[in-house]
Each structure stands twice: as structure tokens, then as C-alpha cells.
């Protein structure tokens, strides 16, 4: 007998935001008494309970497709002409990868092509942000609801106490969390940091995240060397949730120069951890941060550096950003977002009951 | 003191952007640093594939970049037995292949970046030299005879207008002008494209070299010359080359250096010459205009020679940031 809900996703991977989101949807629905099956393109050793896409024939009451890149699961949905709930996390434009990693550029291009084909099969679109929702509406999907990404930072790890507002030992630690990728523009952060170093020679920049593509990391390191800040730029690589929490706690400000964020999980994590945010206004960033951070329309090195210097040097502004951030992040508390996701799916599931 | 809960973040952002602009304006070092940073990243990042350079075969470097990026991820397959075998092989080989491909990709990336830099530099050199490979050239290119040697009057007049040394004469012809300026005690070098003329000139015991005028200028040191004289076969060059020549001359000139242009007005050419030389050479008035646009103070000196009636003398403007258009009558 077919389960009530199928969730289709290219791959379930540890530490991956979409995989965590999928697990949490599974939890919500199972708590509500629905049978949930996860269908994947590539199975890993840890997800023996998942079903390979080749065997999937549809038939569930609701099939939810997690879409953020070109995938075989999306292709199978298109081939089967299966009606779906499209949970859209946005697709980074291929232009960001064209010169760095052409095969990834092809993959995201495929994702975009699939997205327009999926539009006619979509019963309901669920978007992480209003920015993503608008993209779905532009494709002609009428029933679109906004329900943020589900995640719970450091599940099982002790929650840090909010910072007391004083700067860390040096002249300030600037943090960014996210895959080292051209669309995240860590090179702009290094550029801004090179200027900030003129104002605060002992400050440091911490870039948390795995490199994809590796050439980008190589270029970032070369840039830091060329700008003579390599001694104070830390590349942590991928870190555990526990270590990530520690970085949020050890840092003084989160800087984001990303040009494409469908939602911006690290922005919310930073706000939740009382870390002031300075971000470039692109895609869904302003929507996620609202008035709890400094959102800039210009991210040239001097502008970003002046903003970071202001936040690091102005205790009152930092306190204000911390208080507003903590309050604003409550919108994305797991108890709230779980409820939003349930409301987004409820009528579709109960319809056929 | 503002209460923290009353801080307007949009206002604060706008204030920060305004402060950054102010710093750029007031602190030249910061503004230059920003430019240097941008240039540093432009040098390091792979250049965008340009639609202009991609022909039907695609750009060679872009194709190489694509082919050079190995991807060790391979599909596992769906049959149970086969999956198991492939999984085992992949697990055994993956860590090593991943390491190798990462190394290779980084190496290929660096190599391609250097090739792109080389390509950009060659492109810049070609642009500066005005090579006609990718531009439309006037129909009469190469058909128009080189102008005759300057008259004694022009030679004396130009030599009198030459400022400080060293002096570069483009083109040097048979060396009369080079000799006249040298006789005034100034170290003078001439460059002439026509080897026969150079041969004649060498008999005068002057420093006259053969070669492409613009290439010689490009290869010279920045700020090397006190005076640059443009004359002779400059009259038969297309506009793009002349603009390139002005740009290069302004780089190679000392701070207080000057440019002297002694050319005939193309409007005074005979019928055959006008038809063959359509688009080649510009009048002294246009020279003055272009030199002013390049930040020089330029004036026209009358000359009683039958061919060259006006000589342009240009020296650096005292305030180069002034809009040259604002100085026009």
C-alpha cells in the first residue's frame, strides 16, 4: 500500500540544510499520524529507509518535491506527469559557476529548465521566502504559500548564552557561514576585510564552510595573500553544529556579501545567537533580516568596511542589533516554522482523508 | 543619546553608505586601495566567457576550462548486484581519485587563469599597437605614398618648438628633423618605417632607427621623453592608431613634456590622394581637439610652408581634471 506522503529529494546528506528540512517535515507528518516515505536519487549508507527513484511509481496522497538543483528525481516526476507539492529552495543562477565549475553550471541550468516543466504539475508551491514565492508565481503557479526552511541549530548541543556585548579579545571577529562558492561572494568579504584592517589591524575574518568549487577556495587564499591579510583570514572548512555554535559565540559580527540567497539560514542563526548582521541587500536577504541588521545597497570594500567598523565600534548599535536580532529570529523558531509547514500541507492531506 | 530601540536601521545604512563615499572622496589612499582590491580579484578570478569571442567552435580557453574540470562523481547504477560491486570499487578508489582530481582541477584552473591573463595582455598590446586584425581599415591603407621630407622651414620651425630632451621623432624620415633638434644639444632619436629613408638618414650620423612607430612608443619607458614630435608617415595612419599614439605619447612623456605635431591638412590633398587616403590622417585642428581631450593644453602655430600650414604644440594641462570641453570657446 502506498504511504500518505512521498518526499522526493536528490540525496539525503548529513549537515545538508535541505536534508535536515526533509527530516523535519517527515517528523511533523509522522507525529500527525501520516505514513511518510523519502525517495532519493542517490542513497547513502545512512539512509537505508529511503527508496531509490527508479522504483518510485507515485501513488501517494501527496508527493513533495524538494527542488534546488537539476536532479533525476525531478526528471522522474516530469516523466510520470505526477502532481506534486513543489517545495522550492531557489536555484542559484548558472552564471556564477560557468567559469569555475562548468558541470555545476549545467546542473543548475537543468534545475531551472525542470522548474518551468514542473510548474504545470504543481498543486501547490511552498517557498522558503517571499522572494522564492514570487519566482513560482512568475512561472504561473497560482497556489503558493511561504513557509521558511525548517532547521534547528545544534540539536542536542548546549545552547550558548547570549554574548554580553563586549568585543572578543582582538579588535573584532567578522564571521561568515556558508559554502565557499562564487555566488556567496566570500571574495567581497576578504576585500572588505582588507580595508577594515586599515581601521582595525588586529581584527580577523572567519569563513566557515566547505569549498565548492575547490578552485574558488584557492583563489580566495591567493586574494588574501595578495592583499596581505592571509594571516588573519581563517578558513575553517566544514564544521560540526557544536563548533558552529562556538563560532557564532566567539564572533562579533556576521557579514554577508552574498548575491544570491533564497532564504539565508546563517543570517537567522546569527540573529538567534545575538550576533549583529551586516549584509548586502540581494535576493531574500533584506526580507530575512528586516530591521534587525545593517542592510547595504552597495557592497564595495570601503562601504562594507565602514559598516563593519561602525558596528564593531558602536556598543549601542551592537546592543540594538543584538536585541532586535534575537527578537526577529523568533519568527523562524522551529515551533513556529513547524506550524507554518503543517498549515501549508494540512488541507492537501486532509482533503483526501 | 538615541535610545537603542529607536535606531532607524535604514537611516543607519544610508548614513554608512554616505560615510563610505565621503572617505573615498577625502582619503585618496583608501580610494586607491579599493581600486587595487578590485584589480586583484579581477586578476585572480577566471574571466567571464565573452559572447563576443565565442565563435561557433567556442572559445578555446573556455573549452579547455570545461574539459579540464574533472568530476569524480559517477552514477552508481540501480541493479542490486551491480550496485554493490560499483559501490565497493568506488569506495576504494574515491578518496584517492578525489585527491587527484582536486589537485588537477586547481592546477588546471591556475594554468588557464595564467593563459587568460596572457591573452588579455596580448589583447591590450594589440589594442595599443592598433593592429588591424579585427578592425575595419580604411580602403587606402598602404596605397597612399609616404609624405615627402619636411621642408627646411618646417624643420627649423619644429626644432625651435621642441622643449626639453630627450626627444623622439615619429617618423624620422631621412633624419633632417632629428639632426636639427640634435644640433640644439638635445638627445634626439627618430623612428622611421621605411628602411630606405633610414639608410639615407644614417649617413647624417644621427640616431635613426627602423621599426613600427606605435610599437616603438609602446616599448619605451613611461616618462622617458621631454618632447615627442609626430610628423611624416603619421599623416597616413588611421584614426584608431592616432588615438593610440596620443594615449601612448601621454604616458611616455615627462610631467612637463610637450608634443609637437607637424602634419599637412588632409583637406588639402589632391583628388587621387583624397580618394586613396580617405580616413587616413587628421587635420591639425583635429589633432588639437584630440590632444585637449587627452588632458593637454594645445595651440596652433602658423607656419608658412606650402604643405604644412599649422603646427600643433601641446603641453600638459595645469589642471588635468578639468573638463576639456569646458575650455572650448
Image: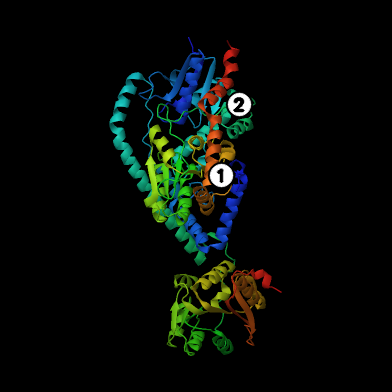
Residue under numbered circle 1: A294
Let me know if residue B229 appears in the view. no
Q: Is residue B269 or residue A296 the one in the foreground?
A: A296
Q: Is residue A336 or residue B37 the one in the foreground?
A: A336
**Residue A177 found in image quarter:** top left
Give the residue at x 34% y 23%: B83
Disc 2 and disc 1 on one polypeptide chain: yes
Q: How far, Cα to Cα, is label 2 from label 1? A: 28 Å
Residue B225 in the image, given as x and y percentages of width and height:
48, 78
Precedes in sequence: disc 2 or disc 1: 2
Residue A323 in the image, given as x and y percentages of width and height:
54, 38
In the rendered image, the residue lying farthest to the front is B1
Dot 2 falls on a residue whose secondary structure is strand
Q: Is residue B197 or residue A348 the one in the foreground?
A: A348
Give the residue at x 45% y 78%: B195
- Could you tell me which chain the residue with mark 2 belongs to? A
Give the residue at x 46% y 23%: A23
Quarter that holds the C terminus of chain B: bottom right
Dot 1 falls on a residue whose secondary structure is strand
Residue B318 in the image, given as x and y percentages of width and height:
59, 75
Residue under numbered circle 2: A145
Give the residue at x 43% y 84%: B202
| A3 to the left or right of B239 | left
Task: Tell me if residue B313 comes above or below residue A173 in the rendering.
Answer: below
Indicate the colouring scheme: rainbow
Mark 2, Cα crowd under 10 Å, few <14 / some 14-19 / many 20+, is many
Task: Tell me if residue B299 comes above or below residue B90 in the rendering.
Answer: below
Task: Tell me if residue A90 comes above or below residue B265 in the rendering.
Answer: above
Let me know if residue A94 appears in the view. yes
Mark 2 vs mark 1, foreground winner is: 1
- Could you tell me which chain the residue with mark 1 belongs to? A
Mark 1, Cα crowd under 10 Å, few <14 / some 14-19 / many 20+, is many
Amino acid at each position: 500500500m502506498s504511504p500518505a506522503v512521498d518526499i522526493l529529494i536528490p540525496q539525503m546528506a548529513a549537515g545538508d540544510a535541505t536534508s535536515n528540512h526533509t527530516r523535519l517535515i517527515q517528523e511533523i507528518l509522522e507525529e500527525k499520524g501520516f505514513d511518510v516515505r523519502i525517495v532519493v536519487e542517490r542513497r547513502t549508507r545512512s539512509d537505508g529507509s529511503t527508496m531509490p527513484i527508479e522504483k518510485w511509481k507515485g501513488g501517494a496522497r501527496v508527493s513533495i518535491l524538494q527542488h534546488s538543483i537539476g536532479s533525476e528525481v525531478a526528471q522522474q516526476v516530469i516523466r510520470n506527469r505526477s502532481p506534486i507539492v513543489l517545495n522550492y529552495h531557489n536555484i542559484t543562477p548558472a552564471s556564477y559557476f560557468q567559469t569555475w565549475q562548468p558541470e555545476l553550471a549545467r546542473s543548475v541550468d537543468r534545475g531551472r529548465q525542470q522548474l518551468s516543466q514542473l510548474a504545470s504539475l504543481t498543486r501547490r508551491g511552498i517557498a522558503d521566502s517571499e522572494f522564492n514565492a514570487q519566482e513560482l508565481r512568475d512561472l504561473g503557479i497560482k497556489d503558493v504559500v511561504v513557509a521558511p526552511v525548517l532547521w534547528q541549530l545544534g540539536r542536542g548541543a548546549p545552547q550558548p548564552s547570549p554574548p554580553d556585548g563586549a568585543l572578543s579579545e582582538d579588535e573584532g571577529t567578522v564571521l561568515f557561514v556558508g559554502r565557499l562558492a562564487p555566488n556567496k561572494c566570500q571574495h567581497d568579504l576578504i576585500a572588505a576585510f582588507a580595508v577594515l584592517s586599515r581601521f582595525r589591524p588586529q581584527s580577523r575574518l572567519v569563513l566557515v564552510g566547505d569549498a565548492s568549487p575547490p578552485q574558488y577556495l584557492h583563489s580566495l587564499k591567493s586574494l588574501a595573500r595578495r592583499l596581505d591579510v592571509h594571516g588573519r583570514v581563517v578558513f575553517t572548512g566544514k564544521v560540526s553544529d557544536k563548533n558552529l555554535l562556538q563560532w557564532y559565540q566567539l564572533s562579533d559580527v556576521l557579514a554577508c556579501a552574498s548575491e544570491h540567497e533564497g532564504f539565508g539560514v546563517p543570517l537567522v542563526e546569527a540573529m538567534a545567537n545575538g550576533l549583529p548582521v551586516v549584509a548586502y541587500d540581494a535576493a531574500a536577504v533584506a526580507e530575512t533580516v528586516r530591521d534587525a541588521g545593517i542592510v547595504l545597497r552597495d557592497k564595495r570594500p570601503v562601504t562594507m568596511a565602514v559598516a563593519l567598523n561602525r558596528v564593531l565600534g558602536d556598543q549601542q548599535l551592537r546592543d540594538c542589533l543584538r536585541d532586535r536580532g534575537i527578537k526577529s529570529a523568533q519568527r523562524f523558531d522551529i515551533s513556529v516554522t513547524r506550524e507554518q509547514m503543517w498549515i501549508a500541507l494540512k488541507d492537501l492531506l486532509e482533503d483526501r482523508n | 543619546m538615541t535610545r537603542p530601540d529607536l535606531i532607524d536601521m535604514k537611516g543607519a545604512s544610508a548614513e554608512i553608505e554616505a560615510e563610505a563615499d565621503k572617505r573615498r572622496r577625502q582619503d585618496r589612499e583608501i580610494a586607491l586601495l579599493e581600486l587595487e582590491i578590485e584589480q586583484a580579484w579581477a586578476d585572480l578570478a577566471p574571466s567571464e566567457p565573452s559572447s563576443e569571442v565565442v565563435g561557433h567552435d567556442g572559445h578555446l580557453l573556455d573549452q579547455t576550462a570545461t574539459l579540464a574540470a574533472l568530476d569524480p562523481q559517477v552514477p552508481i547504477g540501480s541493479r542490486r548486484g551491480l550496485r554493490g560491486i560499483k559501490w565497493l570499487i568506488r569506495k576504494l578508489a574515491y578518496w584517492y581519485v578525489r585527491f587527484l582530481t582536486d589537485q588537477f582541477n586547481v592546477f588546471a584552473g591556475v594554468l588557464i587563469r595564467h593563459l587568460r591573463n596572457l591573452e588579455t595582455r596580448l589583447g591590450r598590446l594589440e589594442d595599443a599597437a592598433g593592429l588591424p586584425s579585427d578592425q575595419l581599415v580604411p580602403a587606402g591603407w598602404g596605397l597612399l605614398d609616404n609624405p615627402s621630407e619636411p621642408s627646411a622651414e618646417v624643420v627649423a620651425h619644429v626644432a625651435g618648438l621642441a622643449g626639453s630632451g630627450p626627444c623622439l621623432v615619429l617618423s624620422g624620415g631621412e633624419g633632417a628633423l632629428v639632426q636639427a633638434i640634435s644640433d640644439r644639444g638635445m638627445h634626439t632619436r627618430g623612428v622611421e618605417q621605411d628602411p630606405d629613408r633610414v639608410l639615407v638618414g644614417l649617413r647624417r650620423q644621427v640616431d635613426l632607427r627602423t621599426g613600427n612607430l606605435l610599437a616603438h612608443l609602446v616599448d619605451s619607458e613611461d616618462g622617458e621623453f621631454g618632447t615627442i614630435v609626430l610628423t611624416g608617415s603619421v599623416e597616413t595612419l588611421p584614426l584608431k592608431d592616432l588615438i593610440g599614439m596620443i594615449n601612448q605619447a601621454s604616458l611616455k612623456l615627462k610631467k612637463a613634456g610637450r608634443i609637437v605635431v607637424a602634419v599637412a591638412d588632409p583637406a588639402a590633398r589632391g583628388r587621387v590622394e583624397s580618394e586613396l587616403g580617405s580616413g587616413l590622417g587628421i587635420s591639425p585642428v583635429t589633432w588639437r581637439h584630440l590632444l585637449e581631450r587627452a588632458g593637454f593644453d594645445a595651440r596652433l602655430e602658423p607656419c608658412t610652408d606650402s604643405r604644412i600650414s599649422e603646427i600643433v604644440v601641446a603641453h600638459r594641462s595645469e589642471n588635468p581634471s578639468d573638463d576639456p570641453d569646458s575650455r572650448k570657446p
